[in-house]
Image: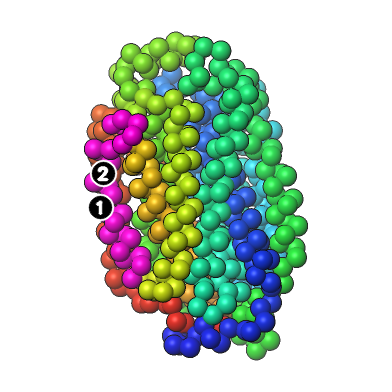
Amino acid sequence: MSAATTGDSKASATPANPRSRVITASLIGTTIEFYDFYVYATAAVLVFPTLFFPSANPTTSLLASFATFGAAMVARPVGAMVFGHFGDRYGRKATLVASLLTMGIATFLIGVLPTFESIGWWAALLLLILRLGQGFALGGEWSGAALVATENAPAGKRAWYGTFPQLGAPLGFIIANGLFLIINALLPHADNPALQSEAFIAWGWRIPFLFSAVMVIVGLWVRLRLVESTSFQKNAESGKLKKSPLAEVFRFHWKNLILGTFIMLATYVLFYLMTNFTLTFGTRASSVEAAQKAAEAAGKPFDPSTFFPGGGFGYVDFVLMLIIGVVFFGIFTLVSGPLADRFGRRKTLIVITILIIGFGFLFEPMLGADKGLTQAFLIIGFTLMGATFGPMGALLPELFPTNVRYSGSAISYNVSSILGAAVAPLIALQLWQAGDGSPFLVGMYLVAMGVLTLIALLLSRETKDINIDN
């Protein structure tokens, strides 16, 4: 796809979809999708190790729970290929509706799944299958939402419009964790507010999964009102659509697939370290004595030889700290769009990636040291997360022409999820354990991934002025 200095000016004067509909449809779908993912991530820390992967060793249970969390990332590139094919071949609208419906069904079924106590290891297998269904759906969701935003954006505002599907990530986090906090408050533990009550473990954790059905109905209503973008319609009318967009993108655009994958890498690693790892680290006991006391209160066995310390914060306290950090995630997601429209996607992301590399050196002195420093750490990390995540909504789609844009952006985004998000919780847990409770090695992992992203950005070209209709 060739660059054109007047690319944005060629955008249609009368967009196929009104601005409010574009923003709402791209935002609400990704909010629901990320809500579903965050609900699983929270449950994977709080209840799934006990309910689906019981073991005498709590670390083994946690690793098994994280493995199912990561398994969804493996399914995402498959979803990207399938939904990408249909999105490039037959249109964005129907594909987006299908991805949202698939995600909603999988999430709802997790909410009614029997546990290990009822059906043994079949429970873990069914959970894995439904988790793969979530990953498959999300593989087609993000890129479709990004295309709805960018292909309908007015001249000079593609990166700004591209931040709205990205805003679904912080909103989904706040809704999911806020709902868990409310349920935890309504079903408190009798003796220790840092622990989950029997009612929460028995049935309270299911409510956020079941609530997903309501959100999906709203999302479907919004998306069914969309019409196809001008870019897709022009390609369809001129006969430029490909019978096999997947083969086309691998044959002619493989370089951009690789660059896009590594450009997203640091973003993904930072994303899951700031959400999944910090929640695990922050709510883990800070001493053997505290861990043993918590195990006794919960009626669970405890092996001191397998223990390594964490932040020692209560669950409610730490989730509130996370939500404060995520507010900065949302603010800087929106701020980054106008910056990328003004200065270019590449320049903006190079600066932010260098800052992310520097942030990796803050894990040891700030995370878990005390509440004030930990809160500052979360705010800095989520600010960088928003700043790097926002421009991706425009940059990845701009790497590919219209007739393979869904496939190309989806594959890059989701293959990066394997290299980054799928293994990040497992690698972080192992590095944390290897450091005997110190998060220093986890920070160095982020530094290494940031360097790979920086190299990819330096090898890429600016996409701000390309013609989105080509």
Q: Give the numbered dot on residue 358.
A: 1
| Residue 125 vertical placement versus 260 (above, below) | above
The answer to whether mark 2 and mark 1 are in CB contact below 8 A is yes
Callout 1 crowding tier (Cα within 10 Å): few <14, some 14–19, many ≥20 = some
Report whether residue 406 is seen.
no
Q: Position of residue 347 (x, y in %)?
A: 33, 71
The residue under the point 31% across, 66% down is 350
Answer whether residue 191 is magenta in the image.
no
Quadrant in the picture for residue 452 = bottom left
Q: Nearer the viewer, residue 243 or 335?
A: 335
Q: Which residues are magenta?
A: 347-373
Label 2: element kind: helix
Answer whether residue 364 is magenta in the image.
yes
Q: Position of residue 294 (x, y in %)?
A: 43, 15
Q: Which residue is mark 2?
A: 362
Callout 2 crowding tier (Cα within 10 Å): few <14, some 14–19, many ≥20 = some
208 sits left or right of 441 in the view? right
Q: Position of residue 276 (x, y in %)?
A: 44, 40
Q: Position of residue 198 (x, y in %)?
A: 60, 17
Label 1: element kind: helix
| Residue 374 vertical placement versus 460 (above, below) | above
Q: Nearer the viewer, residue 150 or 309?
A: 150
Amino acid found under the numbered disc labelled 2: Leu
Amino acid found under the numbered disc labelled 1: Gly
The residue under the point 40% across, 12% down is 293
Marks 2/1: CA–CA distance: 8 Å
The residue under the point 72% across, 68% down is 226
